[in-house]
Amino acid sequence: ALDEEGPMAATLILNEGLPFWGEAMVDPFGNYLFQKILEKITAEERVMLVKSVSTRLVNASLNLHGTRSVQKVVELCAADLEASGKAKDVSSKGATAGGGEDEAEESS
């Protein structure tokens, strides 16, 4: 249904399962649904989902099935950040604020 119905179905499933996504992340079968939902929802919905499971991310990363869920979270959120252009803003501010690597190389 997710592939055929797309974002509308993903949003419905996301909202219905919101209290259970933390458990689904580490479930042998639920982690597949969690990852699929992450792929199909919007960036704003992804932020909402990540916030709802944020307290469980560390424990999930230590779990065989949860590791895959956490990897998908990192992958998709990084892509969202890059697509929004914020990654470039952050890196340019960091380069001008501290000088960073160039100063370290010159002082060596």
Image (cartoon, rainbow, N blue to C red):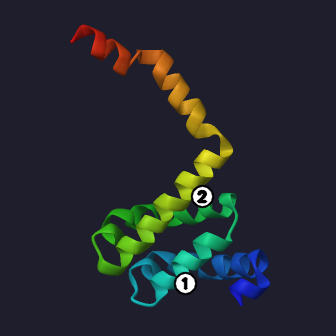
Q: What residue type is labelled 2?
A: Val
Res 15 → quadrant: bottom right
The percent position of residue 100, horizontal first and vertical second, equals: 37, 20
Q: Which percent across, then down, holds residue 64?
A: 30, 79
82 vs 62, nearest the viewer: 82
Image mark for residue 47: 2
Q: Is residue 34 left or right of residue 41?
A: left
Is residue 51 or residue 75 the one in the foreground? 75
Q: Looking at the image, which residue is at 54% across and 25% down?
A: 92
Residue displayed at 67% across by 82% down: 13
Residue 29, position as x, y percentages in the image: 45, 90
Q: In this view, does 12 lie to the left or right of 80?
A: right
User: Which residue is painted at 68% across and 69% down in the image?
Assistant: 41
Question: Label 1 sits on what residue type?
Answer: Leu
Q: Can residue 87 be seen in this view?
A: yes
Quick check: 101 left or right of 91? left
Residue 19 visible, this orientation:
no
Residue where numbered disc 1 is placed: 33
Residue 30: give x, y in percent of width and height: 48, 86
Q: Is residue 108 above or below residue 8?
A: above
Q: Is residue 65 above or below residue 93?
A: below
Tell me the quarter of the picture where residue 101 sits.
Answer: top left
Marks 1/2: CA–CA distance: 17 Å
Q: What element carries label 2?
A: helix
Query: Callout 2: few (<14), some (14-19), or many (20+) C-alpha neighbours within 10 Å?
Result: some
Q: Which mark is residue 63?
A: none
Residue at image point 75% right, 75% down? 7
Secondary structure beneath dot 1 equals helix
- 13 or 89: nearer the eye? 89
Quadrant of the frame with the C terminus:
top left
